[in-house]
Amino acid sequence: MRIAVVTARRELDPKGLFGIPVFEAENLPDPDSSTAQPYERKRPDAQWVHDDPTAADDRHREKSFVVECKRLGFTTSAGWNLNEQYVVGGVERFRSPDHRYGVHLADGAMIGYVQSMGLPAAHAEVCQHLFIAGGLPPLMLSVDGWQQKGISELYQGFQRNFPVSPFRLTHLWLDIQDIPKTPAAPLVSPSVAKAPSRRSSVAKKASSRSTKKRTA
């Protein structure tokens, strides 16, 4: 993913006006707070840290455009509800005072990797969880409609009790259901990885005996 981002940044922002993305880094310090705040320790998936030329002073010049990524689809065999987590572990963090993703900006983004379930069905479940999470507005599909095996764009706006409000969240859903899964590499115990093979042990013993005969 990092290499893909570098390529996209070089093509779309050759002058580097929008800064360099950082991954799983802490939120920027809040310039409006005189002491360290708990939400400054939160770690969004990705941030584009950049200078805002319209800022009134240097204290507010550094901004961070936040992108949060989540999976979408049926509940996993382990009981993990992907569509619910997209809301409570994703969207809600842009509104929650305890996380404050995208603070001091009016925009942010979510990336949803649709691993299973039809796009309209996943949308219906996400909107249901948005309502349960405290009346968050539903996601509005762009005029381009659903893009099977492609990228669908959705939009959402809501109020929050810290700047900037209202806030606009863009959702990009990637339909990856037809992409073959790469099998995970088998786990190897550290003791097995370090243990010498029988052939290696025999070779070492033979070499030791040969050395003794030559020195005898």
Image: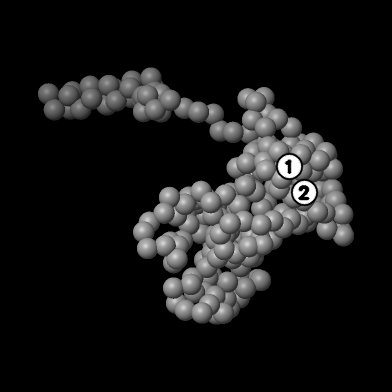
- Residue plotted at (84% across, 48% down): 148
Q: In which quadrant of the rendered view does residue 34 lie?
A: bottom left
Furthest toward the left, the residue is 216
Asked if residue 213 is positioned above or below residue 117 in the image, the reply reads above
Image-based side of 16 in relation to 142, left or right: left
Image-based side of 126 in relation to 105, left or right: right
Residue identifier under label 1: 131
Q: Amino acid at mark 2?
A: Pro
Of mark 1 and mark 2, the one earlier in the sequence is: 1
The reply to whether residue 204 is visible in this rendering is yes
Q: Which of the labelled discs sits on residue 192, or is there none?
A: none
Q: In which quadrant of the rendered view does residue 101 lie?
A: bottom right
Mark 1 in CB contact with mark 2 (< 8 angstroms): yes
Residue 187 spot, x, y in % from top left? 50, 28
* Disc 2: CA contacts within 10 A as few (<14), some (14-19) or many (>=20): some
The reply to whether residue 122 is visible in this rendering is no
Q: Amino acid at mark 1?
A: Phe
Q: Which of the labelled discs sits on residue 138, or is there none?
A: 2
Mark 1 lies on a secondary structure that is helix
- Residue plotted at (45% across, 66% down): 32
Q: In the depicted view, which residue is nearer to us: 54 or 109? A: 54
Residue 149 spot, x, y in % from top left? 81, 48
Q: Quadrant of the C terminus?
A: top left
